[in-house]
Image (cartoon, rainbow, N blue to C red):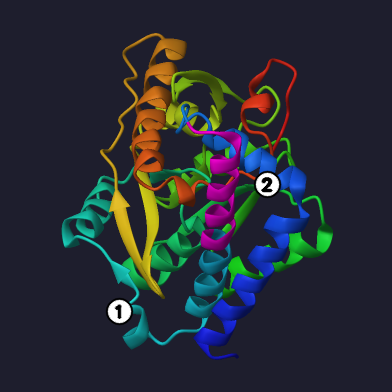
Amino acid sequence: MLPRAVSYGIGNAATWLAWRLMAQTRAAIADNLSAVFPDESSASLQRRARGVLRAYAYDVIDFIRTLSAPPAVLDGVFDYHPNDAKMIVDILAQGRGLIVLSGHYGNWDAGSTFLRRVVSVPLTILAKTEADPEVNRQRREIRELLGVESIEIGKSLDTALQIRRRLAANHVVAFLMDRHIGRDRVAVNFFGRRAWFLKTPVLMGFMTGAPLVPCFIERTAPARFRVLAGSPIVVPRDRPRDEAIAEGAQTFASQLEARVREHPELWYHFYRYWDAQDDTADQS
């Protein structure tokens, strides 16, 4: 409802207040970035944390504004290679569905707008239930506005069956993979450290034969996003299951790491990510 410049002004003010007043969050972001910039001082990393908060605020603002944007406006929002959109259509033509992978990097929510309103493919998002019921309700309403189905992880005992049904119906199923949930996890090497990524999407790729396609949405200017499709990952079904899953997960982790190195300000974890990688952690 507000002019974009006013929205950004509010975002800037909120970012500055958050950076000044939320000391634990500021320190957590700085600690996360220490893996990307191991030689930087704590003070320097905390300055970078403000850039992360600002980028996140802008991403939220721009995503909300895309929800009701007319098609002619959307044409100017997303920059993408036509071959990437064609790749999605060609994979779906094989009839096995498609698993889209991303991380808490860039504007993954805007990716829903791109897939539904630009590429026009059926989309289901796997998401963890938000701790705040009101936030959870708002997220579901936004997805419903876009015509996106939601499956809340851990809400039902038949989550895997629901995923398989969507893939069998030749849908796109999307996951954020760089946070594990309980024992649903697979170990990867991420920035030279051991990290746990979500196992289910790679397991589904192994069980169904559906290809996995990394996808990253990077803000390049006000209301402008670059859509980058990574190299497709086919989880080999003629290999031992655990070996094939570990290899597929590591391939995605390496592609995500490359993007974070390019734009560390777009890596959005607001808790101490590395502390959550020990065997007892269940951070989400």
**The residue tagged with tag 1: helix, strand or loop?**
loop
Residue 10 location (% of width, % of height): 64, 78
State which region is magenta: 40-55
Amino acid at the residue labelled 2? Arg
Q: Quadrant of residue 84?
A: bottom left
At 20% from the left and 57% from the top, the residue drawn is: 86
Residue at image mark 2: 26
Amino acid at the residue labelled 1? Gly
Quarter of the figure with the N terminus: bottom right
Say whether disc 2 or disc 1 marks the residue closer to the N-terminus: 2
User: Closer to the observer: label 2 or label 1?
Assistant: 2
At 30% from the left and 30% from the top, the residue drawn is: 234
At 16% from the left and 56% from the top, the residue drawn is: 83
Residue 71 location (% of width, % of height): 36, 84
Q: Is residue 90 left or right of residue 182?
A: left
Q: Would you place residue 126 above or below residue 19 in this image?
A: above
Foreground of the two, 269 or 27: 27
Q: Is residue 187 left or right of residue 119?
A: right
